[in-house]
Amino acid sequence: AAFDWLSRGLYEAIEGFARQASGPDFELRVCAYEFHYEPFLSLLGDISASGASVRIVYDHRKKSPGAKNAAAIKAAGIEDLCIPRESNPNEISHNKFVVLLEKGIPKAVMTGGTNFTVGGIFGHSNGVHIVQEPEVAAAYSRYWERLSKDPPSKELRPALVQEFPVPSGLPPAGAVPIFSPRTSLEALEWYVSLAAGAKQGLFATFAFGMHERFQEVYRTSKAPMRYALLEKEVRPMAPGPARERAVEAIRKLRFLPENRFAVGAYLKLNAFDRWRAEKLSGLNHAVQYLHTKYLLVDPLGPDPIVVTGSANFSDSSTTDNDENMLVVRGNRRVAEIYLGEFMRMYNHFAFREWAASPQAQRAGFSPSHLRTDDWWREYFGDTERSHQRQFFVS
């Protein structure tokens, strides 16, 4: 029951997508970074036994997660279905997607930031995105075919740049996939330019720190509403002056009235003494709270942009790792779904971060009661709360 609740439909969606492949007319083409959730591996074996063609490219470098992936694959008895990705020992094969083909024709793709592990599915914030557009599925299928040959990155980079160019300016309406590794930071810089173009609202998640280019956007953007969700204030860094400077840069951004940041946290007993203490699941180590990688530009406007996928908006995700991102323009339903999930997580963490603050922990602290004065006045005019009200009522 606990895992059903933690899944929130995520594993059910993954399983349901895969089960569409049943019989010799179907194929599944999988790319995986962490790949050791036994029920999913066994499911792929069962689908293969039904006559469907199942092939899996997985990260098999000597460093993590290669050994754990290989052991799980052996235990599930699906070695014959798997292709190890190992030609780039210093770079990671970070994709997490599945392409569905019927009678040799790509039909749909399931992508996102969810690793196929117990921690990835049940242990922290994640999502999958299913695209039922043959053209997009075909692009992912071609990318899979390249990776299945285990090419070195020096050969893969120019090939991907040529076959999957970064659009100039705004993306076309619909869905555009971007694949890595690439020869330059052009793709990352394009995402930054999309963020900088926000007119009403900017929302982004950062599982491994906010890149300096995005920090500049949050410092200078004209959008009156700028939200960010962070796993921690900064990327993993050793204690010292560099980390202190990085933390201070984020704190300065948080002081800007247009910015609203929330950092992963959980409830401990505090001055209220009325909250049930929470604890972490223990299913993850590197990432405890937030693993999503998506960017929303004007999600409640008439022409929203959603950027989502496996990449962490970093240099290495652009030029080193195997990654995929999906850029969706003009789909208001998709944008609203992402915004709803973003605000669910924002409200969850913002409250917990506040409850852990020195202010809330101070002995004798008492929360504010409902106001009976003209509290509503701050929701009108040129104020932070007025901008927030106007944005969310569109």
Image (cartoon, grey):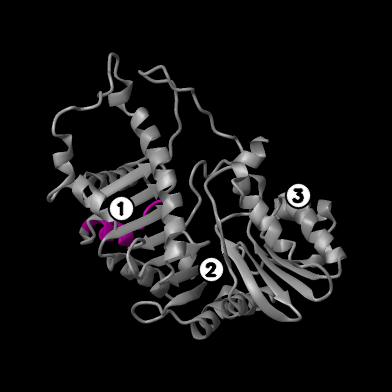
The residue at which mark 1 appears reads as 392
Of mark 1 and mark 2, the one earlier in the sequence is 2
Q: State the residue at coordinates (68%, 62%).
A: 17
Check disc 2: other Cα within 10 Å, few if <14, some if 14-19, many if 20+.
Answer: many
As rendered, which of 372 and 326 lies closer to the eye? 372
Q: How many numbered callouts? A: 3
- Badge 3 element: helix
Q: Amino acid at mark 3?
A: Glu
Q: Is residue 135 above or below residue 62?
A: below
- Badge 1 element: helix
Locate the N terminus by quadrant. Answer: top right
Q: State the residue at coordinates (41%, 65%).
A: 332
Q: Main secondary structure of the magenta part?
A: helix
Q: Residue 380 location, x and y as percent?
A: 15, 47
Measured in 3D between alpha carbons, the distance from the residue under mark 3 to the one under mark 1, in whole angstroms, is 42 Å
Give the side of residue 272 with respect to residue 123, left or right: left
Segment colored magenta: 207-219
Q: Residue 171 location, x and y as percent?
A: 40, 77
Q: State the residue at coordinates (31%, 48%).
A: 246
Point out the frontmost of discs 1 and 2.
1
Measured in 3D between alpha carbons, the distance from the residue under mark 2 to the one under mark 3, in whole angstroms, is 24 Å
Of mark 2 and mark 3, the one earlier in the sequence is 3
- Badge 2 element: strand
Q: Is residue 390 above or below residue 367?
A: below
As rendered, which of 147 and 266 lies closer to the eye? 266
The residue at which mark 3 appears reads as 38
The residue at which mark 2 appears reads as 324
Q: Can residue 284 be found in the magenta stretch?
A: no
Point out the frontmost of discs 3 and 1.
1
As rendered, which of 152 and 176 lies closer to the eye? 176
Residues tagged 3 and 1 counted as in contact (Cβ below 8 A): no
